[in-house]
Image: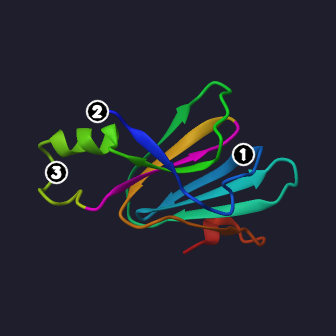
Amino acid sequence: MNESMNSWDTPISSILHLANPEVHFLGGHLHLVLEDLDTTEKWKLEVRDVIGYRFTQHFGMKRLANTFIITESAWISALHQEPMFIPGQLDGVRHYLIATTYEDFEVLTKEEPSISKNRGVQATHWK
């Protein structure tokens, strides 16, 4: 299967040095605090109803943008082959990738993640 990536236009798409200092997973919801290392501005990314997530190393390679939707996802395809899932449970799942300076964050969800400025709210208090 040939995966392809499409740009996903978000407020953090063009930040040159984006870091991921915090990750919180609570009750099926994932919250990340991302930081623009040049301005120290912080962003929060919230994903509801997470099917799966992972971090992958890219060894210092820089992408042209920071946020993508992966189409024809090998990860989703592999999950469809697993006998443990109820048929139809993965229908409508999308594969998102957020590239940071040090690693890539990938998430599977049916709902588009939300990204907004973190206005001093601590990730552990997000509901």
The picture places residue 30, in percent across and down from the top left corner, at 50, 60
Residue matched to label 2? 1
Q: Which stretch appears magenta?
A: 92-101
How many marks can you see? 3
Which amino acid type corresponds to the residue marked 1 in the rendered image? Ala
Going from N to C along the chain, the mark reached first, 2 or 3, is: 2
- Could you tell me how far apart the alpha carbons at marks 1 and 3 are, in whole angstroms? 34 Å
In this figure, which residue is indicated by the disc labeled 3?
85
Residue 18, position in %: x, y? Answer: 73, 47
SS class of the residue under badge 1? strand
Classed neighbour count for the residue bearing mark 3: other residues with Cα under 10 Å, few (<14), some (14–19), many (≥20): few
Q: Is residue 107 above or below residue 123?
A: above
Name the N-terminal-most of marks 2 and 1: 2
- What is the distance, in whole Å, between disc 2 and disc 1 at their CAs? 30 Å
Comparing 78 with 85, the one in front is: 78
In percent of the image, x 77 and y 45: which residue is there? 16
Q: Which residue is mark 1?
A: 19
- Amino acid under disc 3: Phe
Q: CA distance from mark 2 to mark 3?
A: 21 Å
Question: The residue under label 2 is which amino acid type?
Answer: Met
Counting other residues with Cα less than 10 Å from the Cα at mark 1, is it few (<14), some (14-19), or many (20 or more)?
Answer: many
Residue, far top: 59
SS assignment at label 3: loop
> Are the residues at dot 1 and dot 3 in contact (C-beta closer than 8 Å)?
no
- Percent x, y of residue 124: 62, 65
